[in-house]
Image (cartoon, helix red, strand yellow):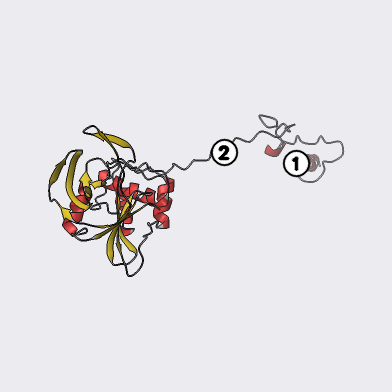
């Protein structure tokens, strides 16, 4: 009997122990509830959250500004200059061989384009000149279809144009009479280029040492007035009366037969 009583006591104690370990049932009356460990979601954060009282100022976004295109001018080299030269040639502005180098000959062609477009004559290619290129600006001839082949010199625009049946086929920058007075051997003269219809009457394949300066490979069309080469061809009237073109341009004229004897030359102010 004593052994049986001990067995029953041990069994009852075991039952009380099992009821308090991990059971989901409520503990028996009079038993202390086991301590509950907090989960991670119940633990306070290291830095308690704070509800902002005002909207934070956003950080400004920096927008990259596009770099303006390079202005093409004397001394510039590269593909952009090559494309410029090819476009000038396409539009009839003679500028020598396209070599990707912006030199004096290319500048002369740019002067001619700017004159035809009626924009500033600085000899460089900025936005306005580029627009004239893109728009395909060409000068207009005064002669009409059926007029044949001739050279026109527009004194207002300061352009020398080779024209066939009313269509301009090539254009050069020129500098004609300054319309200023000058003195020669005690007399005063006006440096003008007379208007009218003329013809090339004589020419010199060399340098003519004239009383007012040298004329390179001149082609005379009105007495002592000629189309001739010169090292100085500004984009405005500056001569004593002749139609100056660059030395490179007069060499091209001679080499290609662009201005043979008896060629009509129309000089006008439009």
State the image coordinates of residue 165 (x, y, percent, origin top left): 32, 67
State the image coordinates of residue 43 (x, y, percent, origin top left): 70, 34
State the image coordinates of residue 227 (x, y, percent, origin top left): 23, 50
Q: Quadrant of residue 208?
A: top left
- Give the residue number, with chain letter if any, for mark 1: 14
Specify the farthest residue to the left.
206
- Relative to the observer, which residue lies in front, 8 or 250? 250
Specify the farthest residue to the right.
29
Answer with left or right where residue 6 lies relative to residue 207: right
Circle 2 crowding by C-alpha within 10 Å: few under 14, some 14–19, many from 20:
few
Q: Tell me the residue at 34%/41% (across/down).
A: 179
Query: In 3D space, how far apart are the residues under numbered discs 1 and 2 (Cα atoms)?
Result: 71 Å
State the image coordinates of residue 263 (x, y, percent, origin top left): 23, 61
User: Which disc is residue 84 wearing?
Assistant: none
- Relative to the observer, which residue lies in front, 71 or 196? 196
Specify the farthest residue to the front.
187
Vertical position of residue 255 compared to residue 166: above or below: above
Q: Nearer the viewer, mark 1 or mark 2?
A: 2
Circle 1 crowding by C-alpha within 10 Å: few under 14, some 14–19, many from 20:
few
- Relative to the observer, which residue lies in front, 10 or 131? 131
Answer with left or right where residue 204 lies relative to residue 147: left
Q: Quadrant of residue 73?
A: top left
- Relative to the observer, which residue lies in front, 18 or 206? 206
Label 2 secondary element: loop
Specify the farthest residue to the bottom.
146
In terms of sequence position, does the residue under pointer 1 or pointer 2 come before the other? 1
Q: Tell me the residue at 22%/41% (across/down).
A: 231
Label 1 secondary element: helix
Q: Which quarter of the rendering shows the N terminus?
A: top right
Answer with left or right where residue 133 lies relative to residue 44: left
User: Which disc is residue 61 wearing?
Assistant: 2
């Amino acid at each position: 009997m004593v052994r049986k009583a001990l067995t029953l006591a041990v069994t009852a104690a075991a039952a009380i122990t099992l009821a308090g370990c991990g059971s989901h049932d409520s503990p028996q009356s009079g038993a202390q509830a086991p301590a509950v460990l907090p989960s991670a979601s119940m633990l306070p954060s290291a830095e308690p959250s704070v509800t902002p009282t005002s909207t934070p100022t956003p950080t400004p976004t920096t927008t990259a500004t596009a770099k303006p295109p390079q202005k093409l001018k004397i001394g510039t080299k590269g593909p952009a200059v090559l494309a410029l030269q090819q476009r000038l040639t396409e539009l009839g502005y003679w500028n020598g061989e396209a070599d990707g180098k912006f030199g004096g000959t290319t500048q002369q062609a740019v002067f001619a384009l700017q004159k035809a477009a009626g924009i500033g004559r600085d000899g460089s290619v900025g936005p306005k000149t580029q627009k004239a290129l893109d728009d395909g600006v060409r000068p207009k001839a005064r002669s009409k279809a059926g007029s044949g082949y001739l050279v026109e010199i527009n004194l207002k625009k300061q352009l020398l144009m080779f024209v066939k049946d009313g269509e301009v086929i090539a254009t050069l920058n020129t500098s004609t009479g300054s319309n200023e007075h000058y003195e020669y051997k005690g007399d005063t003269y006006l440096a003008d280029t007379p208007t009218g219809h003329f013809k090339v009457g004589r020419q010199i394949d060399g340098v003519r040492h004239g009383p007012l300066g040298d004329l390179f490979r001149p082609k005379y069309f009105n007495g002592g007035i000629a189309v001739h080469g010169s090292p100085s061809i500004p984009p405005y009237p500056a001569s004593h009366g002749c139609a100056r073109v660059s030395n490179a341009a007069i060499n091209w004229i001679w080499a290609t037969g662009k201005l043979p004897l008896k060629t009509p030359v129309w000089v006008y102010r439009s």
